[in-house]
Amino acid sequence: MVERSAERGRATRQRLFDAAVALIGEVGWGGVTTRMVAERAGVAPGVVHYHFASVNDLLVEASAAFAGALFGEAARRLTEQPDIGSGLDWLLGELSGYTGADPASPLIVEMYLAAGRHPELRDRLRVMIDDFRSQVASWLRVNGHTGDAEAAAVLLAASVDGLVLHHSLDPATDIAALAAPLRAMLTGQPG
Amino acid sequence: MVERSAERGRATRQRLFDAAVALIGEVGWGGVTTRMVAERAGVAPGVVHYHFASVNDLLVEASAAFAGALFGEAARRLTEQPDIGSGLDWLLGELSGYTGADPASPLIVEMYLAAGRHPELRDRLRVMIDDFRSQVASWLRVNGHTGDAEAAAVLLAASVDGLVLHHSLDPATDIAALAAPLRAMLTGQPG
DNA sequence: TTATCTTTTGGGCAAACGTCCAGGGCGATC
DNA sequence: GATCGCCCTGGACGTTTGCCCAAAAGATAA
């Protein structure tokens, strides 16, 4: 077979992925153009349409791959925490790192919005969220959550995304102060 | 003065606002074009640049006005609830109405993202959020919140936006089930 | 070397873009 | 009726867009 060529192709494809992910965060989903992503990846404009049917296809593939890795990693790291309290501490630590300047936080939100306009992306994203929720829910149950663990997981996932959104608007927000109400929410014991 | 003409101008301006708000929700901030918004408002393309310096200017003005009204109304309605429990019920009722099909829910999120790229919008949005948070916080305090009311308000505002985002992705999510963890979060009494 | 594969190039195309502007309409004022 | 001020029209401009493609380049197999 054509081993070296294929390898080179895969590398280019990956560079296009990286460029797309960065640019979605910088200029928004609708602001990414063929030439932009090609220049960022260091290739000629034609390469984009050689590897992908359309720019939107590239954006869907790239963002889905990125989000899949991010959610998977987050779920893994969170659920390996020994108890809810330290899980929360880890989460808040991660959150304060997302200032909006990094590519990840706006990208995820852009993806949610794009999912509303692209059914294929919508389905893929839904699976990821479902997965994340159920992993968190079972982690909550194992660690002594007394209430509706599914509901708590749904709310936690939404809160995280909401906080990313708000935090990017105002990075001065005191994230650590949120530990108390979040703990109340997660322990499922409303006094 | 030229009373009739000015009035007609104001009406056109309002129609452009409405068209812009609807279109941001439908095609995204970056997807709104001069001709699109002109056609939706029922005017010639040139009118847009007669009333506004640029398309982006229109989007900023329109979305800020819309969000200001929405946040104001939400804060008013929430804080006129007699206790935290019924406030929560009202909030969840509103949330289940936002399915993502309406223009409001994606618009707000689009605005957050656009704010990261347009400092003027960012400042205006920040004021609105601050306002909403402090109104909610004082409402929480009045109604017997025992912990850090500011932190709870921040988390509540973020959760609402996050839930809007998640709910638009999966309208089947059971919103009512979130009442319990939200109540735990808001009463500020972690078991 | 020659032939065959995949990848890459750089330019070309029609369409859509934001913005501008000369001119027409229309009520109020003189 | 003439003039003024504001609003609106519709087309023009230069630029940028997504996508396409003939040809070159690189790697492998014969």
Image (spheres, coloured by chain):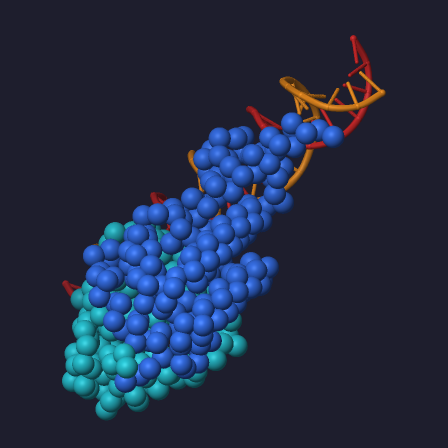
Chain colours: A cyan, B blue, C orange, D red
Q: Quadrant of the C terminus of chain A?
A: bottom left
Name the one closer to the observer, B14 or B16: B14
Residue at the image position 63 percent from the left and 45 percent from the top = B53
Q: Quadrant of residue B89?
A: bottom left
Q: Position of residue B183 (x, y in %)?
A: 30, 72
Name the one closer to the observer, A166 or A103: A166
Residue at the image position 16 percent from the left and 85 percent from the top = A142
Q: Position of residue B111 (x, y in %)?
A: 47, 57
Q: Position of residue A120 (x, y in %)?
A: 24, 54
Judge from the rendering whether residue B92 lies leftward or rightward of residue B143; answer left or right: left
Judge from the rendering whether residue B118 lies leftward or rightward of residue A8; answer left or right: right
Judge from the rendering whether residue B60 lies leftward or rightward of residue A108; answer left or right: right
Q: Quadrant of residue A130?
A: bottom left
Is residue B159 among the parts visible in the rendering? no
Residue at the image position 48 percent from the left and 41 percent from the top = B18
Q: Quadrant of residue B82?
A: bottom left
Name the one closer to the observer, C8 or A23: A23
Q: Quadrant of the N terminus of chain A?
A: bottom left
Question: How many marks overall?
Answer: 0
Name the one closer to the observer, D2 or B66: B66
Is residue B39 among the parts visible in the rendering? yes
State the residue lying farthest toward the bottom: A82
Residue at the image position 21 percent from the left and 61 percent from the top = B174
Q: Position of residue A163 (x, y in %)?
A: 40, 71
State the residue lying farthest toward the front: B82
Is residue A126 positioned above or below A189 on the image?
A: above
